[in-house]
Image: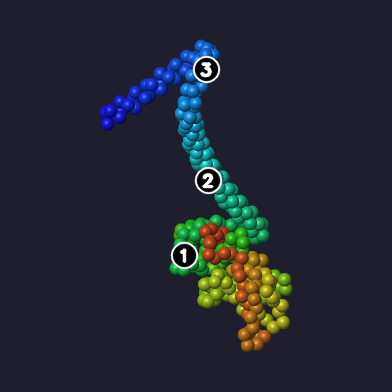
Amino acid sequence: MARLFKSKLFLLILVTVILFVVMGISASGNPHLSWLSNIVNVVVSPVQKFFSSAGHKVEGSVDFFKDTKALKKENEELKKRIEKLEKENNELMVFKEKNEDFQKAFNIKNQFSNYDLLGANIIGKDLGNWFNVFTVDVGTNDGVSSNAPVVTGNGLVGRIMESGPISSKVVSIIDEGSSVSARISKTRGLVQVKGDIVLKDQGLCRVDYIEPGVDIAAGDNIETSGMGGVFPPGIIIGKVKEVRQANNELNRYAIIEPNVDFKRLEEVLVLRSKKSSSGTDRAQ
């Protein structure tokens, strides 16, 4: 093994010496020794090419890893920027929705000038997916009383069922215990909107007491009539999905889809009746 190492070392030294000799000859420019320089070049040229190619490959590999690292860093920066833009976009969407809600609330305030609007957060609800009965964080301390109408910017939600000092329970129009005096917007025909124990689980209501000859069809809007002393007239309730015939003309009823989404309620508005100078509630 030592002998082999010595042989390789000797060859390396010999090649090195030859290279220096050739370099000296080339530098001297002696034409008589050019043949020796040519022979050595033939022998050494493949070695030079090998080392040159290897050097380029190593340099290329280094550049590749540098480029990969730079691209990775740029990709991470782009991801962070996209996440930031998505966050800003979501915030803008929330702001837009809030702005639309405020605009709708402003329109309601103008429509029902005899009422004060009191914003309320939903803090609890009965079991199930739908907000048919739920609790809000306002009560008698805020001037809220039983039967006060509850709305959103989209339409009628229901009424205050019972009120305590700091919270109140709301029964919505999809609950089977709810009944609202209503009318068909296009014809002013009077009807009754009721909650239904089966339709409740679909977020729907039904329209009963449709008089013979009253024109009602799918797509018609239903709104409060103002009769019954609870809800002021003109609050949108929903749109007719279909009209069903039971046994005869007297047993017609309709299915309506409320304007309010009773699966995603978070905030509502309580219509609080303004006090007259004598301290009594104004007539609804």
The kind of residue on which mark 1 rests is: Lys
10 Å crowding of disc 3: few (<14), some (14-19), many (20+): few
Q: Is residue 124 above or below residue 62?
A: below
The kind of residue on which mark 3 rests is: Ser
The x, y position of residue 198, in whole percent, is 53, 77
Please tell me which residue is depicted at 67% across the width and 60% down the height of the picture: 111
**Residue 257 has which mark?**
none
Return the disc, 2 or 3, that comes first in the chain's sequence: 3
Task: Classify residue 269 by image quadrant.
Answer: bottom right
Q: CA distance from mark 2 to mark 3?
A: 70 Å
Res 16 visible: yes
The x, y position of residue 19, in whole percent, is 44, 20
Identify residue for label 1: 125
Return the disc, 3 or 1, that comes first in the chain's sequence: 3
Q: CA distance from mark 3 to mark 1?
A: 103 Å
For the residue pair 74 and 196, the one nearer the viewer reads as: 74
Q: Is residue 46 above or below residue 29?
A: below
Please tell me which residue is depicted at 34% across the width and 23% down the height of the picture: 10
Q: CA distance from mark 1 to mark 2?
A: 35 Å
For the residue pair 188 and 258, the one nearer the viewer reads as: 258
**Residue 83 has which mark?**
2
Q: Nearer the viewer, mark 3 or mark 1?
A: 3
